[in-house]
Amino acid sequence: MTGLVVISGCSGGGKSTLLAELADRGFAVVEEPGRRIVKQELEGSGAALPWVDMVAFARCAMEMGRSDVAAARANAGWIFFDRGMIDAAAALQYITGQSIPDELKAGGFYYGQVFLTPPWPEIYVTDSERLHGFDEAVAEYDRLAAVYPSLGYEVIVLPKVNIQQRADFILDALKAGFSE
């Protein structure tokens, strides 16, 4: 069993804020590959920005996700990921029609429970790294809500509650799942 826990779901659903709360509680966290790529690309050529070349962006996110998993496996305890390789693979599948890579179909990359932030229009905002609208974010959520279970992950949709309650919810679910 792996302690690599994915928090995925709707863009603008509170994932980054939730990861910051978990980090404040002493847990290791891995920042979203997409945001790191956008920052790098804005400082560089910009060729792999999602609004320039979504395929290049998703492929970069896959590679960064692989590196993140490899680095995290050396650590003990729960490590929380703001998205991961499956999110990037789902984007590639949507854009190109290519299937999810076999390495991800076998499961075992991440912990068996994946937590999804649902669409939450009251907290959704765009920024310099998130230019797409809410409707696109909801469509992405729907794809992820279908992909994760198809790969054998149990999807747990996070409640629309304050950030401390969301963090408690995840930790309680992990404690319950780990003791089974």
Image (tube, rainbow, N blue to C red):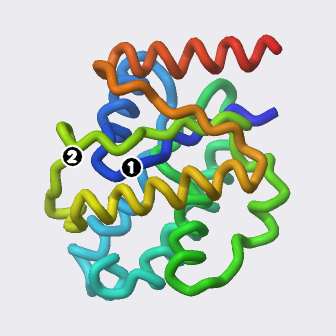
The image quarter in which residue 174 lies: top right
Going by the numbered disc 2, the residue's amino acid type is Tyr
Q: Residues within 10 Å of mark 1 (few under 14, many from 20)?
A: many
Q: Position of residue 8 (x, y in %)?
A: 49, 46
Q: Which residue is mark 1?
A: 10
Q: Image point 49% across, 17% down: which residue?
A: 169
Q: Image point 79% across, 65% down: which residue?
A: 103
Going by the numbered disc 1, the residue's amino acid type is Cys
Going from N to C along the chain, the mark reached first, 1 or 2, is 1
Q: Is residue 130 above or below residue 11?
A: below
Q: Is residue 106 above or below residue 94?
A: above
Horizontal relation, residue 34 to residue 116: left or right: left
Observer-nearest of 133 and 103: 133
Helix, strand, or loop for circle 2? loop
Q: Is residue 175 above or below residue 11?
A: above
Quadrant for the N terminus in the image: top right
Quadrant for the C terminus in the image: top right
Q: Image point 84% across, 57% down: which residue?
A: 106
Q: Which mark is residue 124?
A: 2
Asked if the residue under mark 2 is in contact with the one under mark 1, i.e. CB atoms within 8 Å, the reply is yes
